[in-house]
Amino acid sequence: MKKLIIANWKMQRGYRESLSLAKELVKKLPKKTPNGAREIVLCPDYLSLSAVGDILKKTTLKLGAQDSAPADKGAYTGEVSPAELKKLGVKYVILGHSERRRHLREESLLINAKIKAALARKLIPVLCVGENLSQKEGGLAKKFLNEELRQALKGVKIKTAADLVIAYEPLWAIGTGQPIIPLEAEIINRFLTERAAMILSKKVRVLYGGSVDATNAGEFLKQKHVAGLLVGGASLRAAEFSKIN
Ligand code: PGA
């Protein structure tokens, strides 16, 4: 399967800046990625999603959202419907990102409901999981990750291995300039691949995210169980992000 490279622009760019960044990336990234070996996804903020989607039409780049609601329609002030995202051409949706868990108090039960609602609309959830520094240092990373996975995927059913993606994002590596060592990512990604396979009965893709840039991306992508990358800061610079691919 193609390696998956997802750009998470977070709330780092406004509407106009997002459009220029998307246009720049369309110019910089090869029309057809090398040997068709990569699938590249841009996740702008909600305001820019539709207009960035228009820019990506007729290109090989795909559109992703940074979150979606746990239901299609109803009294959910401030939320965005997975059904509407699907109509807009969104293919992937990041769910359970640690920044949402931390700043917005998102918990597993809600993330679980969001995953189910996204799958019902044939969006591909990118479920983020990751341990914090004290869990890592206390040797509790795998135990914690297993629990995060178990809760988020409770009762989740998928038809094929391509229907859901997991992103391993150790909290201490996000936006710090200190990524995990690629070999360590391989160990954890393998663990997550196996655990998810037990829960879902499918071998879904597991990405790595956290301080990925053009200098270290290659080493991560060489790892057998690193099916791709979730890139934050480095995805905001067109010249750098185009090198990651
Ligand atoms: P970073 O963010 O690449 O800036 O560390 C990754 C993420 O939060 O998805």
Image: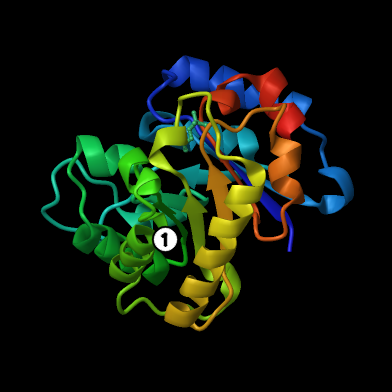
Which residue is depicted at the point 73% across and 64% down? 1
Q: Nearer the viewer, residue 188 or 89?
A: 188
Which residue is depicted at the point 44% across and 19% down? 13
Q: Residue furthest right?
A: 35
Which residue is depicted at the point 50% across and 83% down? 201
Q: Is residue 67 visible?
A: no
- Decide: few, some or many residues near mark 1? Use Cα within 10 Å; few <14, some 14-19, many ≥20: some
Q: Circle 1 — which element?
A: helix
* Residue 81 pos. (x, y %): 30, 53
State which quadrant residue 87 falls in.
bottom left
Q: Is residue 154 left or right of residue 39?
A: left
Q: In this figure, which residue is indicated by the disc labeled 1?
A: 142
Residue 93 position (above or below residue 174): below
Q: Is residue 41 left or right of residue 243?
A: left
Q: Nearer the viewer, residue 92 or 52?
A: 92
Q: Kindly identify the amino acid type of the residue bearing the numbered disc 1.
A: Lys
Residue 55 position (above or below residue 118): above
* Residue 174 pos. (x, y %): 45, 33
State which quadrant residue 215 falls in.
top right
Quadrant location, the C terminus: top right
Residue 12 position (above or below residue 71): above
* Residue 161 pos. (x, y %): 58, 74
